[in-house]
Image (cartoon, rainbow, N blue to C red):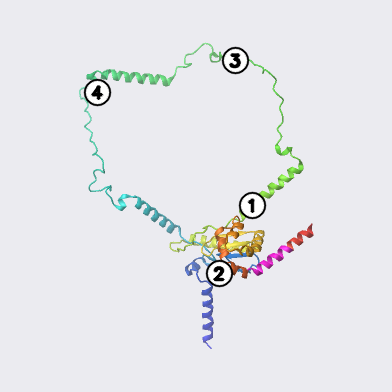
Amino acid sequence: MPRMPILCVALLCAGLASATEGVSAMATQLFGQERAAKRVATGAVFIDGLYVKGPYAISREGNVILVNGRIASRFKVESKAAAAKAEKAATDAAAAAEDPAAIGGDDVVSDEGGATIGSDPTPTLGAAPKADAASGGRTPSAIEERLAKSGKGGGIAGRLSAQQRAKNLKDQSAKGTFNTDPTGNPEALFEEADYTYTPPSRPEPKAVPYVRPGAKKSMTQQLADAKAKETAQAAKRTAAAEAAPADDGDEIATETFDDLTEEEIVAYTKRFAKRRADLEKILENDCLLLLSSQTSGAQYKNRSVMWRFVTQLNELCQAPTASRLIATWRTTLPAGYLQRIFDNRAANAKEMQTLILRVQREARALQERSRNRI
């Protein structure tokens, strides 16, 4: 008799271990767990191209989100310090690959040799001419003396006077001489001005008030344009709302729990909890949800798109290849994910029978309500 409780506990632990297979125990300790508070009977979920039959219970363990106990989304975990260290290591490796000193070679600068690298020795400059102690000024250089003897330089005194004249001319040009002398007439600057009125050769045309192009249209056309503009804005908002909520795209999620700070752990926990709540809300709105078990990437479409996709999927998958399915839906869903759905077409057709019946029933009910409303 005492063995029965032990056996029950062992079976319970084994069941929990199988339910969380693939989830890191360290991630669970750091980021905690969230159990599904309710089961959602609407929506359609595909994980790695395989349809998951509803109703759906969305839970979270660590950095992994599970749908009906199956891993549906995995987040990348890495501390900022580790990321900076890895980036520095990659930068150093790239610099070492481009640096000749890191790989050795003939052009490497040697601290011991240290003379030259494939060039002539650096020329040395002679000593500067010494000042004449008797005169107190500088003595002419050898080049100046040679020019003075040849007569081409005009002599040292001539060159110095030319430099002084150039300096004086520059100073005078900077000051300017326009209107610097006082005159007896204070209106001397305006003597040449002409303020007489010259009438135009012909009268100017009368002003025509500007009328906006939209105001020239009839009221019916203006209402139609306003409705079209509102429809376009609604479509734009819907497209923005249907954007994928993923942060990492198709990048394979990696887990590095070293050097995580308390602030990073809290931020990661909030992010994971928000994603779980978002996915649950998306399914409550009866949307199509595409997930990947190896990344945090996710994409969803509204109910009308989900209905059309579900009702057309079996017929499109009758083709020998996925080209027909991709050609029909590539503008709405990723082509790579459509290929995954086609690869799982046999299992999907079997599991989606209940979903197809529900969609057809709800679509007929909606059409009936619209007909009665008219």
Q: Amino acid at mark 1?
A: Arg
Q: Which of the two residues, 275 or 252, is positioned nearer the viewer here?
A: 252
- Residue 214: within the magenta? no
Dot 3 crowding, Cα within 10 Å, few <14, some 14–19, many 20+: few
Q: Earlier in the sequence, mark 4 or mark 2?
A: 2
Amino acid at dot 2: Arg
Which residue in the rendered view is the most extreme toward the top? Answer: 184
Front position among marks 4 and 2: 2
Where is mark 3, residue-wise?
Answer: 194
Q: Earlier in the sequence, mark 2 or mark 3?
A: 2
Residue 116 appears left or right of 206: left
Q: Quadrant of residue 83?
A: bottom left
Which mark, residue 144?
A: 4
Q: Quote the CA–CA distance across marks 2 and 3.
A: 92 Å
Label 3 – label 4 distance at C-alpha: 61 Å
Say few, some or many: other residues with alpha carbon within 10 Å of mark 2 (under 14 / 14 to 19 / 20 or more).
some
**Residue at left 60%, top 59%?**
324
Question: From which residue to which does the magenta span run?
Answer: 352-364
Instruction: Report the number of numbered marks.
Output: 4
Under mark 3, the amino acid is Asp
The residue drawn where x is 59% and y is 69% is 346
| Residue picked out by circle 2 | 70
How far is disc 3 from disc 1 in space, using C-alphas? 63 Å
First in sequence: mark 3 or mark 1? Answer: 3
| Dot 4: element | helix
- 10 Å neighbourhood of mark 1: few (<14), some, or many (≥20)? few
Residue 306: horizontal and vertical position, in percent? Answer: 64, 61
Residue hosting label 1: 237
Q: Which residue is found at the position 65% from the left and 69% from the top?
A: 353
Task: Point out the residue furthest to the bottom here.
Answer: 1
The location of residue 185, given as percent across then percent down, is: 54, 11
User: Going from the N terminus, do you reach mark 3 or mark 4 first?
Assistant: 4
